[in-house]
Image (cartoon, helix red, strand yellow):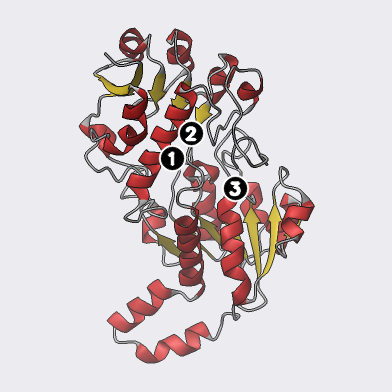
Amino acid sequence: MSKFTVAVQKPQEAELMGGASFNLKADDYSFEEESLIPIGASIVEIPASSDQEFIELAKEADAVIARGRNITAEIIAGLSNCKIIGCGSVGTDRVDVRAATEHGIPVTNVPDVFIEEVADHAMTLLLAIHRHLYEMRDLMRSGRWTDSHPYLRSFPRLFGQTLGLIAFGNVARAVARRAKPFGFHIISYDPYVSEIEMTSMGVEPVSFTELLERSDFVSNHGPLNDETRKIMSTREFTMMKNNAMFINAGRGPSQDESALIDALEKGEIAGAALDVFENEPIDVENPLLRMDNVIVTPHVASATARFLPETRRRLGQEIALVLQGKWPRSAVNPQVLQNSSLERWQPQPMQRGPNH
């Protein structure tokens, strides 16, 4: 008999689509079990068709994996023994974090597994939209070889342009490191990061308004929460330069898509390069898919061969730590840890909670 039970919604075909799931076998838990089996923990799939059924079947679980079902306030209130809710992603959209905090349950994520991959993709999008790669490809396909030089000569060179980073967390810092050698002047808005942290990397801290007004490229890297949902909407796009580009390899709902489409159609901004969307999978009739000045990719910024193994290993490690009475490495609601019985074991100081 297992010492601990870890509950997860039984996978359904509909859940294997959309977002950044890139599923292996959805019911293959071998990577999580590398850390869970040695401590006597077993993963139990919950074949629930409703939140109430999930509560009934997972009520006594020691931990819950937020996969396949949103972990709502109702579910959290119905869990009598839950010590941790684990997310195998950066985003914690599936969990009512406020409700978990009220019940003293840490919610963990994996914020540092695919930083470099997402930063690579953000730079790829930036360079592709700046050099109009889609349009260059289409000119060649249509036999218009000589049209390319005059077209590109109407745009400024990249060196000396201003890159504005919305938020200055792990991915934004990795983007800054990549952008510096291209000759960018980099500015950033993040009210939760000190000026010293930014200036030590050669990044100028600015207000959100100043970032929008000065940037030639605005790149979004903020987490998704009430503060950042639709942080880029009509007012914000209007404040950008008419020749500026918007890049989003962060969170889709951070952009008001109707406002973005309107800004692009009116020429209020010059273009956009997007890996994430307000609703995913994106509707095939979405105007963004047909715009010449928009480059899109299907939420793949983090996708490499190591994505699933490492996120799932990390998820299992976080759950195992808490079930053994220790702080997790990364909790999005670290305030619950201070008053818990969990042991703080990390040898390094925290910057924005147990991880940032």
Disc 3 element? loop
Residue 232: numbered disc: 3
Mark 3 vs 1, N-terminal side: 1
Q: Is residue 254 left or right of residue 26?
A: right
Mark 3 vs 2, N-terminal side: 2
In the image, which is nearer the foreground, mark 3 or mark 1?
1
- Residue furthest bottom in the image: 146
Tell me where residue 146 sits by quadrant.
Answer: bottom left
Callout 3: few (<14), some (14-19), or many (20+) C-alpha neighbours within 10 Å? Answer: many
Q: Which residue is mark 2?
A: 92
Q: Amino acid at mark 1?
A: Ser
Between 171 and 270, the one nearer to me in the picture: 171
Q: How many marks?
A: 3
Residue 3 place in picture, x, y as percent: 35, 15
Residue 89: numbered disc: 1
Distance from Cα at disc 3 to Cα at disc 1: 23 Å
Q: Amino acid at mark 2?
A: Thr
Distance from Cα at disc 2 to Cα at disc 1: 7 Å
Callout 2: few (<14), some (14-19), or many (20+) C-alpha neighbours within 10 Å? Answer: many
Quadrant (top left/top right/bottom left/bottom right) for the N terminus: top left
Q: Is residue 282 visible?
A: no
Q: Amino acid at mark 3?
A: Met
In the image, which is nearer the foreground, mark 3 or mark 2?
2
Q: Residue at x 49, y 25 (%)?
A: 322
Q: Do the CB atoms of the residues marked 3 and 1 lie less than 8 Å apart?
A: no
Q: Do the CB atoms of the residues marked 2 and 1 lie less than 8 Å apart?
A: yes
Q: Residue at x 38, y 46 (%)?
A: 310
Quadrant (top left/top right/bottom left/bottom right) for the C terminus: top right
Q: Is residue 269 visible?
A: yes
Q: Is residue 76 left or right of residue 356?
A: left
